Amino acid sequence: MKVLMIAPQPFFEPRGTPISVYQRLHGLSSLGYEVDLVTYPIGDNVDIPGITIHRAPSIPFIKRVKIGPSIAKIPLDIMLFFMSLWMLLTRKYDVIHSHEEAAFFTVLLSKLFRTPHLYDMHSSLPKQLSNFNFGNYRPIVAFFEMLENWVLRTCEVVLTIGSDLEDYVLFVNRQANHIRIENIAIHNDMKHASGEVAEMRRALNLEGKTAVVYTGTFEGYQGLDMLFESAQTVVAAHPTVQFVMVGGKPEQVARWKQEVAQMGLADNVTFTGIVPLDESLKYLELAEILVSPRTNGLSVPLKIYSYLHSGRPTVATNIFAHTQILDEETAVLVDPTPEAYAQGLLQLIESPELRLTIGQNARARAEKEFSKEGYLSKLERAYLAIKYQKRISEVTLPDGISSGSTVSVSS
């Protein structure tokens, strides 16, 4: 099968949806599909077998795209539409695989070119608008609700990444041909040479210190203000604790360096800035404790899957974004307050046995429920449902392979 994938994101950048798109592409490549990816003119090129990246024309005054809805996305999405239209006019595809708001114009392209539409739903766009301060513009939100409902009622297959979105899809369209495919760790084999990790510890001056590691963006919903407030309590009790913050744009890192200095934490917080994906995994390996202090949101943070697979214990806030996959056996879950977060950290710092137990439980959960093999089999079922025009529940994988096994497919 030949696939046209449309991704209205800067690709590739190590954040949120671009990482999920990256995983989908790797999955389709492993299954033997040929994919033309149409995406923004912003981001780094990646080399994946069977995947060809086609970038929409650049817009001179737009050099980057912030997380969430933005005015900059409007002209970029217009260019993306015309690029997708050109691809469909000049090539033949078996399916159009859309991400996020690209689904809105893919509905039209699907009907025009009589090509099945697979919608990859990473979030509810009307809810995104509300969460990013567009909630006061109710007519705009209502318009996007109408568009989203139209997509969910017309696409041949819809993929979701979590139970919250699954429930929403089935609420809008009880008959949706749907499958939930959770994200997985960035790499299944996360072990690096011990010398590499030891060298990183020395470079970061972590010898004899307890490394508490955060990875991800520095957006407001990530709860970094709460994390640093809790760090004051933790460092007062254990001065050798070192918080290692992996990620953040240069201007965000600069602002937080000033903040932590004013809080008296300058010697206990290390900022790395944005690092390549593979390097970010080394930081998980050198950690004694991982943190996810997110204060709001419904979708599971992508980093949680890599956190679980690392075998390190996590302190996470007790919100739905985390509790969809984390529980008391696989993490320390606390209320989203500085006081509660500090107590969760202290609990792990002061109990090596608890760190070991939770880390082992987390790794076992990742291997059982969020494996690469399970991911591939679900993705294969979705594509075979389109190929054979069936409900996903009716699809039988080739050669009697059961769910959770690696499958192969011919194009």
Image: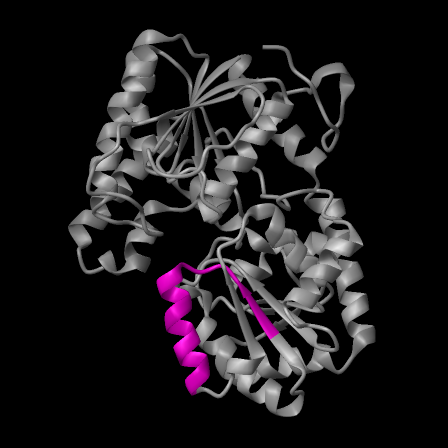
Main SS of the magenta segment? helix
Does the rendering let one see residue 220? Answer: no
Work out whether 42 lies above or below 4. below
Which quadrant holds residue 212?
A: bottom right
Q: Is residue 411 magenta?
A: no
Q: Is residue 261 magenta?
A: yes
Q: Is residue 120 positioned above or below 88 on the image?
A: below
Residue at 52% from the left image edge and 36% from the top image edge: 22
Indicate the quadrant where residue 73 lies. top left
Q: Nearer the viewer, residue 392 or 328?
A: 328
Answer left or right for 201 relative to 73.
right
Q: Which residues are magenta?
A: 243-262
Residue 180 x, y percent position in the rendering: 56, 39
Question: Is 12 rendered above or below residue 249?
Answer: above
- Colouring: one colour
Query: 390 left or right of 349?
Result: left
Image quadrant holding the C terminus, namely top right
Whether residue 332 is visible here, answered yes or no, is yes
Q: 245 above or below 182?
A: below
Residue 15 placed where, x, y %? 47, 49
Residue beneath the point at 58% across and 22% down: 49
Residue 6: give x, y in percent of width and height.
38, 28
Along the viewing direction, whichever of 273 and 17 lies nearer the viewer: 273
- Left/right placement of residue 264 relative to residue 361 reads left
Q: Which residue occupies 55% across, 71% down?
A: 270
Q: Residue at x 59, y 61 (%)?
A: 323
Q: Nearer the viewer, residue 390 or 262?
A: 262
Please give left or right for residue 213 compared with residue 153 in the image.
right
Q: Residue 110 at x, y = what percent?
A: 34, 18
